[in-house]
Amino acid sequence: MAVLVKMTEDGRKVEVIDDAVCLDGRPEATKLVPLIEHPNRQAILRAVPQATHMAGRIVLTLPESAVAQDALNASNRDFDATPGGIAKRLQEAVFQKAKMDGIE
């Protein structure tokens, strides 16, 4: 299930697909970062003054971030309890742990 968040200026779709914010169908982020916590917030605010959140390299305004967060929350509530769904979640957790440990 894909939820449209916005269209970029160059015509690409920003959507929430499954449990990720995607740009033109490719995953960018699995969570939103409030702009106040972002290390480059000053540069981002100079470029997009109404920005409130980031999803990877995608700048979101407050209404766009609300749509994206609602879709991400909905995807997390819809837990796939099949063996394939559980295996996918375990694999994602292992990859996330490895990424946090600096292994890519």
Image (cartoon, grey):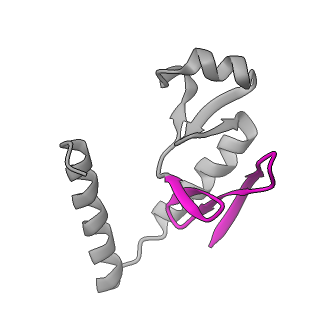
- Residue 35's place in the image compared with 5, above or below, is above
Residue at 65% x, 36% y is: 59
Residue 36 quadrant: top right
- How many marks overall? 0
Q: Is residue 42 above or below residue 55?
A: above
Determine if the magenta segment contains residue 2: yes
- The dominant secondary structure in magenta is strand
Viewer-closest of 79 and 96: 96
The quadrant of the image that shows the N terminus is bottom right
Left or right of 71? Residue 75 is left
Residue range of the region highlighted in magenta in the rendering: 1-28
Judge left or right: residue 22 versus residue 11.
left
Whole-percent x and y of residue 47? 72, 23
Residue occupying image coordinates x 67% and y 19%: 45
Left or right of 4 in this view: 28: left
Residue name at image x 49 percent, y 25 percent = 38
Residue 22 locus on image (x, y percent): 59, 57
Front-most of 1 and 57?
57
Viewer-proximal residue, 26 or 61?
26
Residue 38 to residue 15: above or below: above
Q: Residue at x 75, y 40 (%)?
A: 63
Q: Is residue 6 magenta?
A: yes
Rendered location of residue 71, percent (x, y): 61, 57
Tell me residue 43's x, y (percent): 61, 18
In the rendered image, the residue lying farthest to the bottom is 83
- 40 to 91, vertically: above or below: above
